[in-house]
Image: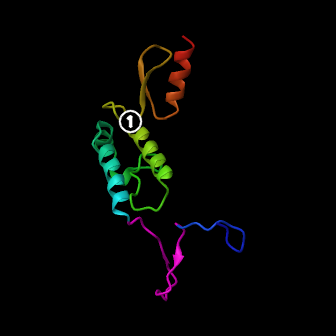
Amino acid sequence: MATASGYPEWSNLPQSSKNNSLGSTVWRTESDPQVLLRRQKQIDYGKSTVGYHNYLDAVPKAKRSIKQPETPDKFQVCSRRSWDGQIKIWRLLLHSWDEEGGNGGRKHKNSEGTDSYENSLMSVEDDTDSDSSK
């Protein structure tokens, strides 16, 4: 639904707090217990993987970069499609840590025929391209 200005009205944007004289914003959070349980189940499933444990052992929280896996916030207000997409991306990033010593990369054969690791999800596309040319 559009506002008088013609821009869409988003329910998850911050709203000014009328009770707060400092003018800070209040963020809405998800409160539906069924949604929160479903989201927590998906998070727990991801946290039980080998990749997640390898990632925790290899990268201290203080040293993590913005490009590394971050657990989605189950309290954020978003559509189910958006949530499922965030979980899918998070799980794909965790899979890059499945192999011990992988340093977050996917193991593949390089041009010399030896194993190497590439720190990118794009290596998945490289692997499929090289398989189709055989």
- Residue 46: percent from left, percent from top: 33, 44
Could you tell me which secondary element the residue under label 1 belongs to? helix
Q: Is residue 13 above or below residue 66?
A: below
Q: Amino acid at mark 1?
A: His
Question: Residue sitting at 51 percent across and 16 percent down?
Answer: 111
Quick one: 10 or 34, which is closer to the camera? Answer: 34
Quadrant including the N terminus: bottom right
Determine the image quadrant of residue 109. top left
93 above or below 82?
A: above
Residue at x-position 50% and y-position 80%: 24
In percent of width and height, residue 10 lies at: 58, 66
Does the magenta segment cover residue 86? no
Where does the image place residue 66, in percent across and percent down from the top left? 47, 50
| Circle 1 residues within 10 Å: few <14, some 14–19, many ≥20 | many
Q: Position of residue 20 (x, y in %)?
A: 47, 86
Q: Is residue 36 above or below residue 57?
A: below
Instruction: Name the image quarter holding the C terminus.
Output: top right
Along the viewing direction, whichever of 43 and 117 lies nearer the viewer: 43
Residue most extreme to the top: 134
Asked if residue 13 is among those painted magenta in the image, a careful observer would answer: yes
What segment is highlighted magenta in the picture? 12-31
Q: In the image, is residue 107 above or below residue 111? A: below
Q: Which residue is mark 1?
A: 95
Main secondary structure type of the part rendered in magenta = loop
